[in-house]
Image (cartoon, grey):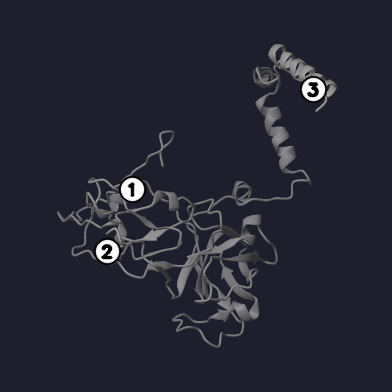
Amino acid sequence: MNKTLRTILVLAIVILTLVLLFNNPFGHSDYLAWKDEISEVEYLSALSAIKNSEYITRYSYVSYLEDHEVTYGLSDADATNFDLAAVNDYNYSGDHAVDLAETGIATYVVNVPTAGLYHIFVDVYVRASVLNNLTLAVTVNGETPFDDASTIDVPLLWQDDSKDFVLDTYGDESLPAQQRVLAWQTIGLSNNTYSTSDPLLFELEAGENTIVIDNIMDGDLLVGDMTIVAPVAVPSYAAYISNYDGVASPETTMTINATEYSSKNSSYVRLYAFQSPSVSPYDAVDKKLNVINGDAWDKAGQEVTFTIDVAETGLYHLNLHYLNDKDEFSV
């Protein structure tokens, strides 16, 4: 770098420093002035104009729910499928299975007495060759009701190959190998971001409706029977417990270890050895797998299933032993 260029560069840095020092654009905000200038009505009007703009093409499930009212008290219904039956239905116990790897789509017809929003549940079987979740698309009466209907998630079920954990050369327990659970399962249609805890709701017209499932990933899977399920309002705890007057609460305590889950819908969810006597099993020297690793269980929609045997019917408390090591917010 020659002397002249170096001098120019130094002068530019000095001038920029002086500008930022005496007229820092980041040192103040016009938010309060803007807040006084724009009313709530004007803000909502501008928001509506943006939402309805021809340049905004995305129509999310959240926006869809804002435009539709959920009606409770509707009736469930079974859909009918007339597609070619699968040659090998993998011992399906339902009425009709379709091999999406062969047909590409599955078409269902369902009649509902009342128009409204409904959940869609369908039986699926994913072949052993698949090791990652699949994605389907759904149309209702020839239309995609919202963008999220094009990214329906088909999660796989996984389990540990053994609960007798192998010890490494240091005497520490090693993570078990993961294996697919190859079985038919019933899933409520949800998109792959799991923006809501309940399955997606789809608007159906009174009378006949056509629902098409599209195998957009060419996934190696079969689909079976479809059920249309009416939404149910979640009652308050007071309303719920009032249905169990006189039901006993057994004085039985059962402890289920975190390692004893029967299945999970993500192979990324894994165990961890937490070195603390507050959890069990614990050893002061050797590491024992004893908790589910929160760093691997941090995505919406990830589920872990525990299967327990209860000796006596009754009302039980459910207590969870957990750790939230985040200082900023609760989980």
Q: Earlier in the sequence, mark 1 or mark 2?
A: 1
The residue lying toward the viewer, choosing from 169 and 290, is 169
Which residue carries the number 1 mark?
A: 239
Structural distance between the alpha carbons of marks 1 and 2: 26 Å
Which residue carries the number 3 mark?
A: 6
Measuring 57% from the left and 76% from the top, which residue is drawn there?
220
Describe residue 295's horizontal placement relative to residue 249 as left or right.
right
Measuring 45% from the left and 63% from the top, which residue is drawn there?
267
Describe residue 221's horizontal placement relative to residue 34 as left or right.
left
Label 3: state its secondary structure: helix
* Position of residue 186 measured from the top left corner of the image (x, y, whole percent): 46, 69
* Position of residue 142 measured from the top left corner of the image (x, y, whole percent): 70, 66
Residue 146 at least partly seen: no
Marks 3/2 in contact by CB < 8 Å: the verdict is no
Residue 325 to residue 283: above or below: above
Label 2: state its secondary structure: loop
* Position of residue 235 measured from the top left corner of the image (x, y, whole percent): 39, 49
Q: Amino acid at mark 3?
A: Arg
Measuring 79% from the left and 19% from the top, which residue is drawn there?
12
Q: For residue 308, which numbered disc appears in the image?
A: 2
Which quadrant holds residue 221? bottom right
